[in-house]
Amino acid sequence: MASKAFSLMIHGGAGRIREVQDPLVAEQYHAAMLRVLEAGRERLARGERALDTVEYCAALLEDDPLFNAGTGAALTRAGTVELDAAIMDGTTLGVGAVGAVRGIANPIRLARAILEDGAHVLLVAEGAANFARQAGLPPIDESRLITAQRREQLERTLRRGTVTLDHDESAPGTIGAVARDQRGHLAAATSTGGMNGQRPGRVGDSPIAGAGVYADDHTAAISATGLGEHFLRSVFAKDLADRIELLDLGGTEALAASLRRLRDRLDGYGGAIVIDHAGRCAAGTTTPRMIHGWIEHGGASETRIDP
Ligand code: ASP
């Protein structure tokens, strides 16, 4: 395969995703993913960086109320929108991340601003929102991010007294994008509203490098989705990258091994998308479904909902 070929993968969350039994809903997901993949393809094909492309694709997915990130994010049990996001540059191992930030339309852009600033890796809550202002990202009224569907979802969850993975509540999930550009550089981005009905202040795996996001040009770019506590405890993304580096596995084999460990050790619930250093795409999950799509080595766009 030509070394100049680029690869791109995105995901829109994992879980039962029962709503896709309605073919019209399934079609919406496929169409939404295809739009983002084609927009990403255009950029990578004209030589843009993996880092810029994953930020761009993640922001598009954040803006789509179908997904649990940015507009349409899941709500905390207090009815607030608290967003987690991270972006990682596989060339420098630079990371920018935000946790539990409020009043921001595109947390992935804020994460990128933190990466570019370089002083810190992770900013949370008010400090993150204040930095957004300094970085020129305008504050927005939180109500603009809340959809009627999310309010209903939260009401159902509170009635039952549970906390749920967004996709197990018949509504869409966390997003991620990973890419390898024509120069062979890797980058990863993950963004989420977290778990439906979570405690205010809870931060999941998505903004934590090595758990829900990771990129290293020598190994892979990874974005995970699922029950964040499982991915934090298993240090999932770094476990996967280590398998590539230390055991000399490809992305597909490493992902299978890390998912096996997640299942066996933690009864872990979730999945991931992976592009390895050679540009090969892999996806897998322990859940019944995962919304995901890919372009491998500049080939056709593929989208899947079943694993
Ligand atoms: N991993 C996310 C979290 O725990 C949720 C998800 O992937 O849907 O915050």
Image (spheres, grey):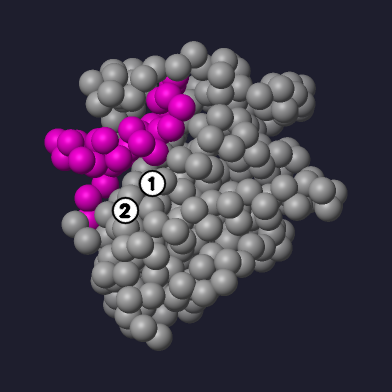
| Residue drawn where x is 36% and y is 83% of the image | 2
Given the current orientation, which residue lies at the most extreme bottom position? 1
Furthest residue in direction right, as rendered:
22
Residue at horizontal 26 percent and vertical 70 percent from the top: 183
Q: Residue furthest left?
A: 119
Q: In the rendering, at what x and y percent does residue 72 appear?
A: 60, 30
Q: Residue at point 46% right, 27% down? A: 105
Q: Which residue is denoted by mark 1 in the rendering? A: 55
Please give the label number shown on residue 137.
Answer: none
Residue 192, how many percent across, how many down?
Answer: 50, 38
The answer to which of 152 and 148 lies nearer the viewer is 148
Query: Magenta segment: does it hold 205?
Result: no
Q: Start and end of the magenta stretch? A: 93-121
Residue 94 is a magenta residue: yes
Which kind of residue does numbered mark 2 sit on? Leu
| Residue 182 versus residue 68 in the image, above or below | below
Residue 104 spot, x, y in % from top left: 42, 24
The quadrant of the rendering that contains the N terminus is: bottom left
Q: CA gap, disc 2 to disc 1? A: 6 Å
Give the residue pinned by disc 2: 51
